[in-house]
Amino acid sequence: MTDEETPIFERGDVVYGDDLFKGEEDARPWLILSNHEGRPFHGDQYIALMLTSKSWMDGLIDIPEERWLRGGMPDESRIVPWGVQSIADDAETGDRPGKTFRGLQ
């Protein structure tokens, strides 16, 4: 992939990246929080929050179906607010699940 083909993720995009608990061979969905144009690493690194399909943990943030602007997840997913990670631009984009959260626009 050339630099011209590398997408720049926007706030609210959901992409697949490495799973911190299972290793690089597995991927999990991440909600992009930060992508500030004009700042160092714009388009190269992103601050993201982990998504999970688990429901038994306290403090998870539900994602109602109507909050998806396009796409979605195969299973009902929730945001893990303490699952903060810096992910690189090599996150998987071919099957990007979608864009969520009107409130983050």
Image (cartoon, rainbow, N blue to C red):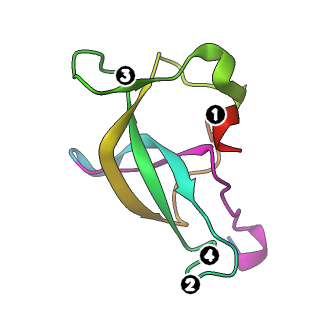
Q: Is residue 4 magenta?
A: yes
Q: CA distance from mark 4 to mark 2?
A: 6 Å
Per the image, the residue denoted by label 4 is 42
Q: Residues within 10 Å of mark 2 (few under 14, many from 20)?
A: few
Q: Is residue 34 left or right of residue 8?
A: left
- Judging from the image, what secondary structure is the residue with disc 3 in? loop
Q: Amino acid at mark 1?
A: Phe
- Judging from the image, what secondary structure is the residue with disc 4 in? loop
Q: Amino acid at mark 2?
A: Pro
Disc nearest the viewer among 1 and 3: 1
Per the image, the residue denoted by label 1 is 101
Q: Please say if 6 is above or below 75.
A: below
Q: Residues within 10 Å of mark 4 (few under 14, many from 20)?
A: some
Per the image, the residue denoted by label 3 is 53
Q: CA distance from mark 1 to mark 3?
A: 17 Å
Q: Which residues are magenta?
A: 3-20
